[in-house]
Amino acid sequence: MKSLPEHTVAVREVEIRYRGRGLRTRAPISRPDHFVHLARRIVSDDAREHFLAVYLDGRSRPIGHSIVSVGTATASLVHPREVFQSALLLGAVSLLVGHNHPSGDPKPSVDDERITERLCKAGELLGIRVVDHVIWTRGAAFHSFVERGAMPSAG
């Protein structure tokens, strides 16, 4: 078996869309429905859950986005490590996260509430604020943790 040279470097690909498809606006994202409009342009396959992060500059304008996870019809696996990796690379000041519910019911699950809390705590440690977590459906319905007063404090 041939051994690898001493200075071999492994590269892991991370896809971040920097002001790419779907981010042609320089307007700030100031309301959950703005996020939903953008998310629906980015995520076209709504048969499975997609967890999306949109990274913002100091004026709440999108500077990039990443589909962090693609799951099943009822769940997606999300870890703060993957959400904040791209935020750090882009120099984001804050971020919005969200995912679709293929079931058509935007009500958050217990797991949705847990990951929101974990992301807020991780963001506090890194100095990158999680502005909101929005769950959208195929129809017009969506759930904003901020609008419902359910956004956890980081402390």
Image (cartoon, rainbow, N blue to C red):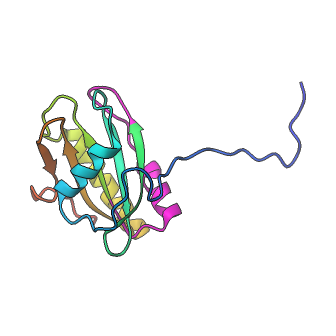
In the rendered view, does 125 fall on the left or right side of 146? right
What residue appears at the point 14 percent right and 39 percent down from the top-left corner? Answer: 106
Residue sitting at x 20%, y 40%: 110
Q: Quadrant of the N terminus?
A: top right
Residue 123 drawn at (x, y percent): 37, 63
Q: How far from the left and from the top, in percent, is residue 46?
A: 28, 32
Q: Is residue 101 magenta?
A: no
Residue 30 versus residue 81 in the image, above or below: below
| Residue 98 appearing in the image | no
Q: Is residue 93 above or below residue 3?
A: below
Residue 136: where, in percent of width, then height? 19, 42
Q: Residue furthest bottom?
A: 58
- Furthest residue in direction front, as rendered: 24
62 displayed left or right of 32: right
Q: Does 80 lie within the magenta span?
A: yes
Q: How far across and down, in percent of the image, does residue 86 sit?
A: 48, 56
Q: Which residues are magenta?
A: 70-95
Q: Is residue 14 left or right of residue 108?
A: right
Q: Quadrant of residue 112?
A: top left
108 lies left or right of 117: left
Q: Which residue shows up at 9% across the image and 55% down it?
A: 148
- Front-lying residue, 68 or 116: 68
